Image (tube, helix red, strand yellow):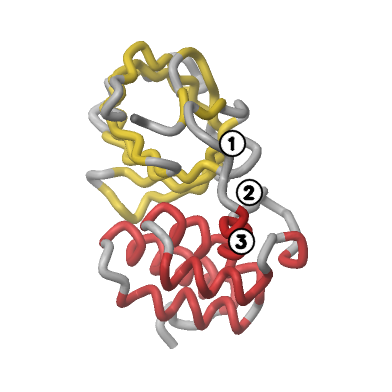
């Protein structure tokens, strides 16, 4: 059974300034979900399908403007979703996102060991010192976490300066394509600001 209940209306804000609203109409015991979505301008709508597995949520939105967004999210102790999205047809188009809704659990609260992996939700603009688990917890999540946890960890790593950039660079060899893509995009954004090559 899926750990969280995501049925109903909820909204996300992306780091690129865009918003999207979701109406999840069906959530099966095996975690499969179906619903609809609408972008903030209310002219672009789409069909949503995906799956929840424990505290990870992966779903696809097929928009009516001939684009398809893949969303990878991770639930945190407060019940909020934090993750990343990219255009499935143009993976270089990337943004982080966070839900404005706190979701409820079907099952028990997190184990005490969850905090060791630094699972406190990260908010854009939050200082690195506020991320639960610090640099060591972040390293553990990047090594041992699910793809969704690793993606969120990469976004957090960029707050740590050179040690964080080194961790993001190492993620270019990650087994998951989505993680490698987000790592490259983050390094590219960083290089645009410094004038250096993403892999230098």
| Quarter the C terminus occupies | bottom left
In this rendering, which labeled residue sits more in front, label 2 or label 3? 3
Q: Position of residue 157 (x, y in %)?
A: 58, 69
The relative height of residue 180 versus residue 44 in the rendered view (above or below) is: below
Q: Which residue is mark 3?
A: 118
Q: Which residue is at 52% across, 62% downward? A: 153
Left or right of 49: which side holds 17? right
* Image mark for residue 121: 2
Left or right of 143: which side holds 108? right
Q: Secondary structure at mark 3?
A: loop
* Image mark for residue 80: 1
* Image mark for residue 162: none
Distance from disc 3 to disc 1, alpha carbons, whole Å, reads 15 Å
The relative height of residue 57 versus residue 24 in the rendered view (above or below) is: below
Question: Is the residue marked by circle 2 packed among few (<14), some (14-19), or many (20+) residues within 10 Å?
Answer: many
The relative height of residue 67 versus residue 177 in the rendered view (above or below) is: above
Q: Which residue is at 48% across, 26% downward? A: 106
The part of the image, by quadrant, that contains residue 89 is: top left
In this rendering, which labeled residue sits more in front, label 3 or label 1? 3
The relative height of residue 129 versus residue 49 in the rendered view (above or below) is: below
Question: Mark 2 near mark 1, Cβ–Cβ under 8 Å?
Answer: yes
Mark with earlier residue (2, 1): 1
């Amino acid at each position: 059974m899926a750990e969280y209940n995501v049925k109903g209306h909820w909204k996300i804000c992306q780091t690129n300034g865009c918003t999207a609203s979701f109406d999840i109409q069906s959530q099966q015991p095996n975690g499969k979900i179906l619903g609809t979505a609408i972008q903030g301008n209310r002219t672009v709508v789409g069909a949503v399908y995906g799956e929840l597995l424990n505290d990870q949520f992966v779903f696809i939105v097929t928009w009516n403007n001939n684009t398809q967004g893949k969303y990878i999210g991770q639930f945190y102790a407060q019940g909020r979703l934090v993750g990343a999205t990219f255009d499935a047809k143009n993976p270089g188009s990337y943004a982080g996102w966070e839900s404005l809704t706190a979701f409820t659990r079907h099952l028990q609260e997190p184990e005490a060991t969850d905090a060791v992996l630094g699972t406190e939700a990260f908010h854009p603009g939050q200082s690195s010192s506020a991320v639960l688990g610090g640099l060591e917890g972040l390293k553990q999540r990047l090594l041992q976490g699910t793809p969704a946890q690793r993606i969120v960890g990469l976004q957090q790593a960029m707050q740590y300066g050179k040690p964080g950039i080194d961790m993001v660079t190492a993620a270019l060899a990650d087994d998951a394509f989505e993680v490698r893509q987000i790592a490259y995009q983050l390094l590219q954004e960083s290089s645009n600001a410094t004038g250096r090559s993403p892999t230098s």
